[in-house]
Image: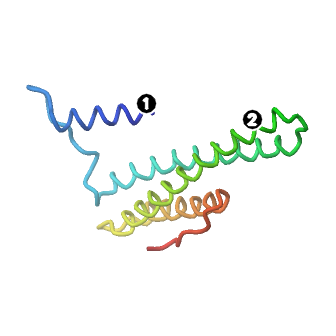
């Protein structure tokens, strides 16, 4: 939430500007290796967060199966439902991001095979997370 707030301020600052202040510059053009690397870094952060949430979900599911306390069962079920909804949102967002990054890496001119390989690797990781989240597989290639 803090990052979203900060990003909103940066966008507004960039649009409105400040008298006498330099203008905000983008990290690179949408078809540049620098921009694709930036997207890939953000995607990797999302992959780590999604993996952590999925691991937490699995741990809570194991606790739920092992408990006999009705109050704890109800609490864990509520936590699992919230976590599941959060995981679905995160994974769906990751699917879209990973396809965008892969397409961006695929159309770079001149071609950048290491960057394209990293994007494909991230795309395959997102597919595995999608299966764990219960969303199925999104096609690996556009």
Do labels 1 and 2 touch, CB within 8 Å? no
* Quadrant the C terminus occupies: bottom left
Q: Is residue 131 left or right of residue 96?
A: right
Against 73, residue 19 (above or below) is above
Element type where label 2 sits in the image: helix
What is the distance, in whole Å, between disc 1 and disc 2 at their CAs?
Answer: 27 Å
Question: Which residue corresponds to the image point at 77% horizontal and 38% vertical from the top-left?
Answer: 74
Relative depth, front residue between 30 and 139: 139
Q: Quadrant of residue 107?
A: bottom left
Residue 45, given in percent of the width and then of the height, sits at 51, 44
Against 88, residue 116 (above or below) is below
* Quadrant the N terminus occupies: top left
Relative depth, front residue between 126 and 26: 126
Q: Nearer the viewer, mark 1 or mark 2?
A: 2
Q: Quadrant of residue 68?
A: top right
**Which label was assigned to residue 45?**
none
Q: Which residue is mark 1?
A: 2
Question: Which residue corresponds to the image point at 53% horizontal and 58% vertical from the top-left?
Answer: 122
Coloration mode:
rainbow
Element type where label 1 sits in the image: helix
Task: Give the mark, 1 or 2, whose residue is nearer the N terminus.
Answer: 1
Q: Is residue 90 left or right of residue 10?
A: right
Residue 17, given in percent of the width and then of the height, sits at 15, 32
Question: Which residue corresponds to the image point at 43% horizontal and 60% vertical from the top-left?
Answer: 115
Q: Local crowd at mark 2 within 10 Å, few (<14), some, or many (≥20)?
A: few
**Which label was assigned to residue 75?**
2
């Amino acid at each position: 939430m803090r990052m979203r707030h900060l990003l909103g301020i940066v966008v507004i600052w960039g649009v409105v500007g400040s008298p006498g202040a330099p203008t905000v510059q983008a990290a690179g053009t949408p078809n540049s290796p620098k921009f694709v690397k930036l997207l890939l870094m953000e995607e990797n952060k999302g992959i780590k967060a999604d993996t952590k949430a999925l691991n937490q979900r699995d741990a809570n599911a194991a606790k739920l199966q092992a408990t006999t306390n009705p109050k704890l069962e109800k609490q864990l079920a509520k936590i699992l439902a919230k976590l599941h909804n959060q995981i679905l949102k995160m994974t769906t967002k990751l699917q879209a991001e990973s396809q965008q990054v892969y397409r961006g890496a695929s159309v770079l001119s001149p071609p950048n095979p290491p960057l394209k390989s990293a994007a494909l690797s991230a795309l395959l990781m997102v597919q595995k997370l999608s299966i764990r989240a219960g969303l199925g597989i999104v096609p690996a290639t556009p």
